[in-house]
Image: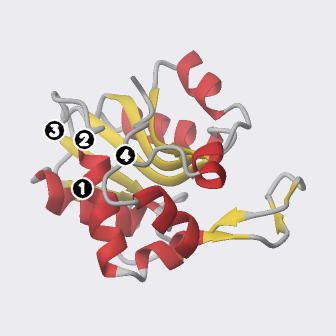
Amino acid sequence: MTTNTRLPGGLAARLAETALVAAPFHLADGARLDSYFDEYRLAADPELLRDTAAALAGLVPGDAQLLAGIELGGVPLVVALSVATGLPAVFLRRRPKGYGSRRQIEGAPFTGRRTVLVDDVVRSGGQLLAMARVLRMAGAPVSDALCVLERPLGGRALLAEHRVTLHSLLTEADLSTGKGEAE
């Protein structure tokens, strides 16, 4: 199963209350959403971040050796998830740093380690796919990705076409209906 439909402690409601913002949001491709998931509000709440990471930990494949957080929304999630799972982490920039280390991948050694991508929201899947390619080219096998929220904009299908299985904690419907709550 790729979506966690039973969450502890009212987590879906807490995420919706804290991070779901009912306001226009413009995507990079020009599309407009009526609401958006504000990952900064999630990351700024230590208890909610801890509880979200604990729930995400249950979605990490058993053979994972490394977690990879995508800038910027995936970084606090991957740090919290690393603590929750005991797995080391790397941090991915969209482009190599223009100065200093000039690296695109920072953190733990990654070559040959089965890596799971981590991000806050998946829409079209393009960003996760690009980062999977970066990791694969650098020698880190990637076949799974985790997110807090999956919006139904084709991301799951695109990733599947490229042999990446998406595991989402919540879908858009879970946040609006309260589904996903433990009874």
Q: Residue at x 51, y 45 (%)?
A: 170
Which badge, 4 or 2, is on the more N-terminal residue?
Answer: 2
Kindly report which numbered mark, 3 or 2, lies closer to the viewer in this rendering: 2
Q: Which residue is mark 1?
A: 54
| Badge 2 element | loop
Left or right of 15, for residue 59? left
Q: Which residue is mark 2?
A: 58
Kindly report which numbered mark, 3 or 4, lies closer to the viewer in this rendering: 4
Amino acid type at circle 4 is Glu
Determine which quarter of the picture holds residue 152.
top right
CA distance separating discs 1 and 2: 7 Å
Amino acid type at circle 1 is Ala
| Badge 1 element | helix
Which badge, 3 or 1, is on the more N-terminal residue?
Answer: 1
Left or right of 51, for residue 94? right
Classify 10 Å Cα crowding around label 2: few (below 14), some (14-19), many (20 and above). Answer: few
Q: Is residue 101 visible?
A: no
Q: Which residue is mark 4?
A: 183
In depth, the one of 58 and 137 nearer the eye is 58
CA distance separating discs 4 and 2: 18 Å
Q: Which residue is mark 3?
A: 65
Classify 10 Å Cα crowding around label 1: few (below 14), some (14-19), many (20 and above). Answer: some
Residue 70: horizontal and vertical position, in percent?
Answer: 45, 57
CA distance separating discs 3 and 4: 33 Å
In depth, the one of 114 and 97 nearer the eye is 114
Q: Residue at x 56, y 40 (%)?
A: 130
